[in-house]
Amino acid sequence: MYQLKQVTQTYHCRGKMVTALNAVDLAIEDNEFLAIVGPSGSGKTTLLSVLGGMLKPEQGDVSFDGVSLYDLSVEDRAKLRGTKIGFVFQTFNLVPWLTAQENVQVPMMLAGLSAKQQIDRAGELLDRIGLSDRLDHHPGELSQGQQQRVALARTLANDPQVILADEPTGNLDHETRHQVMEYLDEFHRDGRTIILVTHDSDTASFAKRTLRLVQGSAQSLNERRVA
């Protein structure tokens, strides 16, 4: 799946150099459920951006299914993201003037599926996450938990191999956080690779392996949850 070798990324902030990733070596297997934890500023979101093909590191190599990700053209990386990688964000990133169904249709529209295919699959996915009665509701008419579930359905629209989740439960109450993580666990059981960034230990406990980042350096905690 993923193979990272000596991946390094730094930033300059207020005249100081900050090391977000410090010569990280990391292998992520197909169908893993990996949690990335660590304090704010430790490099978690930077690592997720590198894995998602959105940030070329200053040094090192990132391979995805045996292909060097950043040797691909910008267009080919965008195509890979559109077909193999799904994203879930803390802020949901739903289009406010589109209905729940239309939001889920967006990736399929970009992929060139027919209108009927889009409508049918969006309906199936929203039914799967318990929102078949909210197809025509706009984000502003949904609770935060419902909005994140719409975002999860949208993530599955093009049947991605990998789901990258950046603090997906950060804006949710305890009960809703657990519900969202149950869905991600279900998607993992479907055979997908889940890579999750979180500050929350309960959220991280759903993963089968935990990686801790501190000042850009990675340490595997090898935490596993009994199924």
Image (cartoon, rainbow, N blue to C red):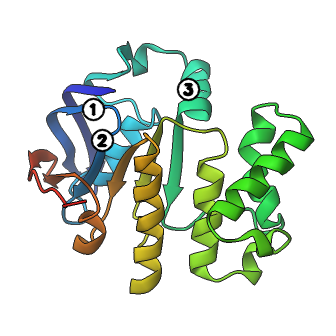
| Disc 2 residue type (three-letter) | Glu
Residue sitting at 54 percent across and 16 percent down? Answer: 73
Give the answer, above or below, for where 37 lies relative to 144. above
Which residue is tagged 2? 32
| Disc 3 residue type (three-letter) | Leu
Give me the disc on residue 80. Answer: 3
The crowding category of the residue bearing disc 3, from other C-alpha atoms within 10 Å (few below 14, some 14 to 19, many at least 20), is: some
| Disc 1 residue type (three-letter) | Glu
SS type, badge 1: loop
Q: Position of residue 107 (x, y in %)?
A: 71, 43
- Could you give the CA–CA distance between mark 3 and mark 1, rounded to whole angstroms? 18 Å
Q: Position of residue 92 (x, y in %)?
A: 58, 65
Image-quadrant location for residue 158: top right
Give the left or right position of residue 32, taking residue 189 as reference. left
Q: Position of residue 14 (x, y in %)?
A: 28, 57
- Picture quarter with the C terminus: bottom left
Give me the disc on residue 29. Answer: 1
- Could you give the CA–CA distance between mark 3 and mark 2, rounded to whole angstroms? 19 Å
Give me the disc on residue 171. Answer: none
Give the answer, above or below, for where 179 lies relative to 210. below
Q: Position of residue 188 (x, y in %)?
A: 41, 48
Q: Is residue 61 visible?
A: yes
Give the left or right position of residue 151, taking residue 101 as reference. left
Q: Residue furthest front?
A: 227
Question: Are the residues tagged 3 and 2 within 8 Å (C-beta)?
Answer: no
